[in-house]
Image (cartoon, grey):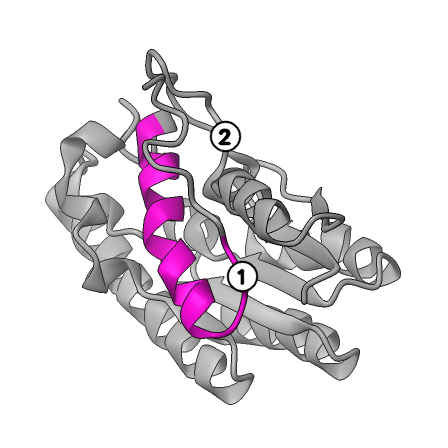
Amino acid sequence: MIHHFVALGDSFTEGVGDPVEGIPLRSAHDWLAEWMRAASPGLRYTNLASRGLRAGEIRAQQLQRGLSLEPDFVSVVAGANDCLKGPFSAERLRAELNLMLGAFQSVGARLFTATLPNFTLRLELPGGVRERVGRNLEAANHIIHDLAGRYDAIFFDFWESDLDKNPALWSEDGVHPNARGYLEIARQVAPVLERHGIAVRVPAAQGEGR
């Protein structure tokens, strides 16, 4: 049983995005925490995420706070701003993610992470910039996949899902999911958590006013 779920990250984990009528604007992590609490009453949940942060800033601002909360389940999703804002360093991203995942593993927490969406499918970028961002994303996702295996983290691969291909799930900025998108991401992540023994109770048509 999970007792305290702590989420580290940037705007994706915070839940930044466009509203959708009839669906509360909440991050996928917030939805998952609610459904986990439905299955395990008494679950604590702390979302430390803040928009606009690169991986190093997430580590500097959130790691020690997260450790102090003594979580037994931790989500670390980071790297999008490293890829989009530049300059991008694969070595630096690997080092920062390695520090965060390693620190939480050392205190016995179970880990969750995920690859980054393919922003180039939606953003209107000049050809050279599109290619650069695409290369950054491929490098970042390779690192995330590798570290997920190293730390035995529960892992969700965005590029193996159909989420990027559905424009109805994304905000106008092309970067953030909208309210419907966060809800759908949570629905796709929930069975991944369940396969790893984490109880999640997903209500039918949750959040859509039906």
Q: Say which residue label 1 marks.
A: 199
Q: Say which residue label 2 marks.
A: 26
Q: Quadrant of the N terminus?
A: bottom right
Q: Name the residue located 30 percent from the left edge and 51 percent from the top edge.
A: 117
Q: Name the residue located 52 percent from the left edge and 73 percent from the top edge.
A: 197
Percent of width and height locating residue 86? 43, 51
Question: Can you see residue 115?
Answer: no
Q: What amino acid is labelled 2 in the image?
A: Arg
Percent of width and height locating residue 170? 27, 31
Mark 2 crowdedness (10 Å alpha carbons): few <14, some 14-19, many ≥20: many
Mark 1 crowdedness (10 Å alpha carbons): few <14, some 14-19, many ≥20: some
The residue closer to the viewer here, 74 or 204, is: 204
Distance of mark 1 from mark 2, alpha carbons?
20 Å
Q: What amino acid is labelled 1 in the image?
A: Ala
Q: Tell me, for residue 48, which label it has, or none.
A: none
Q: What secondary structure is marked by label 1?
A: loop
The reply to whether the magenta stretch includes residue 191 is: yes
Most distant residue in the right direction: 68
Q: Quadrant of the C terminus?
A: top left
| Region rendered in magenta | 180-200
Quick check: 139 left or right of 27?
left
Q: Name the residue located 74 percent from the left edge and 52 percent from the top edge.
A: 62
Percent of width and height locating residue 183? 38, 36
